[in-house]
């Protein structure tokens, strides 16, 4: 540097350069403050992406402060055999003494402000997050983002669909949506069934589309609330509800998209199911038809037990079920063909279930809680009752012929006006127990193949309610359905524990802990299902004949129909069914 003294000329040049540099620095500082000002203003007016810096101007690779990259390590599921032990926020609990881990109800306002920052999931401790939640609530209260902003947002260019998994683009973690329902109970909202991160789900926006053609479409955009479904087994991903509150007199949109950033063109487009628009559905004068529906969790592993499927559909139909909703993860060819036949008769709704999450590792059993809750809302106003059962489970009334008769009779004994669900205790009919004696004499391969006829021995001890129990619910009184009980009712509704002498859940399966030891437990012979024997055989045989060629169904043989039993039926242990209990408890 000192060398420069030797040349004045050079030094003059240098000082000019330095001056220019100083000017440039000044310019940069001014620019910096200008940009900073814009960022602050953007933040204040919140026209884009809450919690991500200032959206378009300050991209930071989508990484948000406080965002834990993964909670995978924290995951631990102990599937303790009969009792499903959860590892919650620092304590263990099981179905018997249930403590609710309330991800969904963390904050009553908008979104999970704070939930994403704290592994324990406790919200509202960060005042700035609460402030943001309030700002978002304001936007929602005004019925969406300001009109000037709304008009500059991209439109949609995909056809609206219902009942198919679609992606929410631009999120850091997997985020999918399946169906949308107009829920007018309590807070009016569009309720979307989806799947996303269990802990700290990412924030998303609702784009509500009004008008059903491209030329008539206008949109309203507002902040969504994500409520993670409570039964999530603490896995990384979970079924969820995404709620778009319809504030003030915002009417129900025709369709909706969920976006991670308002400026992104939507990657999904969901048709809103709205009972008011569906000619089949309830309106003020018509009331809900007195019909019963069955919901079954996604069918997987190329399930192809044709006879079991026919038994399930036909026995439930005899029991008074009008409609079945099933989800096709992977179906075997024969069962697929049988179901298509029932679909063509309007008895079955079969929805595709291609959810891009790893079952049991990322999400519980193909995201079954999304399916169960989708079916709950899909059945609402269409059916007065919905049973959420598996293919090896049957709710069998003891004295009544059908489930509607049972429900009606319970209504004469108790005030069931507000009953939101009827719970039935589980009885295992272990497949390893010997066949019913009548089966040994039978040469009728259909009879031999029907599990409800072949297996008549069951555990004498029933599981208590909420453990393995299943239920029949009145969908319009339910907010959130679980596998064995209802997690959330519309206020003022609850569960009626149906006494076992009125009906129980017949559950046909192998020992739940593996091995064959389960058959040593005390058992009784229960022929209740034989009430349906003749009708069931007739219907199943007729269907088998009809579909045999079309669905390439095999000749029935002893080995095809069921796994080999290991124990002969010991008729000495036969004992009486439990006597009638007078007390019916309503909780
Ligand atoms: C919809 O728009 C996106 C982005 O503008 C484009 O990539 C995509 O091809 C469009 N899809 C259709 C079906 O036009
Ligand atoms: C759009 O809505 C109008 C009026 O509600 C209706 O007549 C028309 O059939 C609808 N078109 C489509 C494609 O849904
Ligand atoms: C509510 O509806 C009235 C009349 O239809 C309309 O004038 C008003 O702007 C609406 N308010 C909001 C917030 O949408
Ligand atoms: C409501 O139901 C009644 C009786 O079934 C029917 O006559 C009427 O058209 C329905 N109204 C609407 C809006 O669908
Ligand atoms: C079930 O889903 C698979 C995979 O998407 C599909 O190939 C098959 O055709 C579906 N079966 C039926 C009966 O819809
Ligand atoms: C249902 O069962 C009860 C209890 O046994 C009986 O009193 C009632 O008559 C039955 N109702 C019908 C319709 O079968
Ligand atoms: C009952 O037990 C007796 C003697 O143990 C046996 O002869 C008979 O076949 C059994 N009955 C049935 C129906 O299995």
Image (cartoon, grey):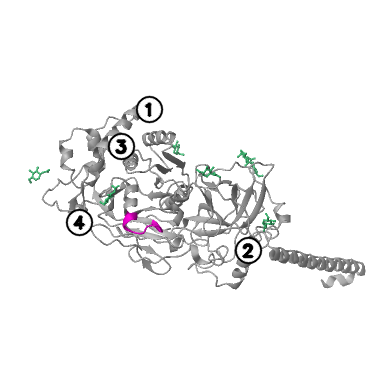
The answer as to whether callout 3 falls within 8 Å of ligand 5 is: no
Q: Which residue is mark 4?
A: 578
* Disc with the residue nearer the chain's start (3 vs 1): 3
The disc, 4 or 3, on the residue closer to the chain's N-terminal end is 3
The quadrant of the image that shows the N terminus is bottom right
In three-dimensional space, the C-alpha distance between marks 4 and 2, rounded to whole angstroms, equals: 57 Å
Q: Secondary structure at mark 2?
A: helix
Task: State whether label 2 is within 8 Å of ligand 3.
Answer: no
Counting from the top left corner in percent of width and height, residue 9 is at 92, 67
Q: Are marks 4 and 2 in contact (CB under 8 Å)?
A: no
Q: Quadrant of the C terminus?
A: bottom left
Q: Is 427 positioned to the left or the right of 54 in the image?
A: left
Q: Are marks 4 and 1 in contact (CB under 8 Å)?
A: no
Give the mark nearest the N terminus, 4 or 2: 2
Q: Which mark is residue 307?
A: 3
Q: Is residue 441 above or below residue 518?
A: above
| Relative height, residue 528 to residue 248 (above, below) | above
Please state which of residues 222 and 384 is positioned toward the viewer in this rendering. Answer: 384
């Amino acid at each position: 540097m000192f060398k420069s003294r030797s040349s004045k000329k050079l030094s003059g040049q240098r000082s000019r350069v330095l001056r220019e540099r100083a000017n440039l620095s000044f310019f940069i500082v001014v620019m910096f403050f200008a940009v900073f000002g814009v960022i602050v203003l953007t933040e204040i007016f919140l026209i884009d992406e809450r919690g991500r810096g200032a959206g378009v101007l300050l991209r930071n690779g989508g990484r948000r402060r406080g965002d834990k990259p993964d909670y995978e390590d924290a995951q631990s599921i102990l599937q303790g055999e009969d009792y499903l032990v959860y590892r919650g926020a620092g304590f263990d609990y099981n179905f018997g003494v249930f403590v609710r881990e309330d991800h969904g109800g963390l904050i009553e306002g908008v979104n999970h402000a704070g939930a994403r920052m704290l592994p324990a999931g406790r919200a509202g401790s960060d005042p700035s997050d609460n402030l943001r939640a309030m700002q978002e609530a304001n936007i929602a209260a005004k019925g969406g983002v300001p009109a000037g902003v709304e008009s500059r947002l991209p439109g949609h260019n995909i056809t609206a669909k219902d009942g198919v998994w679609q992606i929410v683009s631009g999120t850091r973690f997997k985020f999918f949506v399946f169906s949308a329902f107009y829920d007018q109970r309590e807070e009016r909202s569009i309720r979307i069934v989806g799947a996303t991160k269990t802990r700290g789900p990412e924030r998303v926006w609702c784009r509500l589309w009004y008008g059903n053609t491209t030329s008539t479409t206008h949109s309203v955009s507002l902040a969504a609330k994500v409520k993670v479904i409570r039964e999530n087994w603490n896995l990384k991903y979970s079924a969820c509800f995404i709620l778009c509150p319809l504030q003030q007199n915002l009417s129900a949109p025709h369709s909706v998209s969920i976006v991670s950033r308002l400026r992104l063109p939507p990657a999904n487009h969901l048709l809103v199911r709205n009972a008011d628009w569906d000619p089949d559905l309830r309106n003020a004068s018509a009331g809900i038809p007195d019909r019963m529906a069955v919901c079954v969790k996604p069918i997987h592993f190329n399930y192809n037990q044709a006879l079991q499927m026919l038994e399930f559909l036909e026995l439930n139909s005899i029991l008074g079920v009008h409609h079945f909703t099933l989800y096709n993860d992977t179906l075997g060819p024969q069962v697929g063909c049988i179901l298509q036949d029932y679909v063509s008769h309007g008895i079955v709704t079969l929805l595709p279930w291609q959810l891009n999450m790893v079952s049991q590792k990322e999400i519980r059993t193909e995201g079954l809680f999304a399916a169960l809750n989708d079916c709950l809302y899909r059945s609402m106003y269409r059916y007065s009752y919905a049973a959420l059962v598996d293919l090896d489970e049957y709710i069998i009334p003891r004295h009544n012929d059908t489930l509607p008769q049972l429900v009606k009779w319970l209504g004469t004994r108790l005030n069931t006006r507000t009953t939101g669900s009827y719970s039935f205790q589980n009885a295992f009919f272990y497949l390893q127990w010997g066949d019913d004696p009548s089966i040994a004499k039978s040469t009728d391969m259909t009879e031999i193949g029907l599990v409800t006829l072949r297996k008549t021995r069951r555990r004498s001890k029933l599981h208590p309610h909420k453990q393995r129990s299943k239920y029949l619910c009145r969908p319009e009184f339910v907010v959130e359905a679980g596998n064995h009980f209802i997690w959330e009712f519309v206020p003022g509704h609850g569960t009626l524990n149906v006494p076992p002498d009125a009906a129980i859940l017949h559950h046909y399966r192998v020992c739940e802990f593996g091995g064959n030891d389960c058959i040593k437990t005390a058992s009784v012979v229960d022929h209740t299902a034989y009430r349906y024997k003749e009708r069931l055989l007739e219907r199943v045989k007729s269907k088998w004949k009809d579909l045999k060629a079309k669905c390439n169904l095999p000749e029935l043989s002893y080995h095809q129909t069921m796994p080999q039993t290991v124990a002969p039926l010991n008729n000495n242990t036969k004992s009486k069914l439990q006597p009638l209990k007078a007390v019916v408890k309503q909780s």
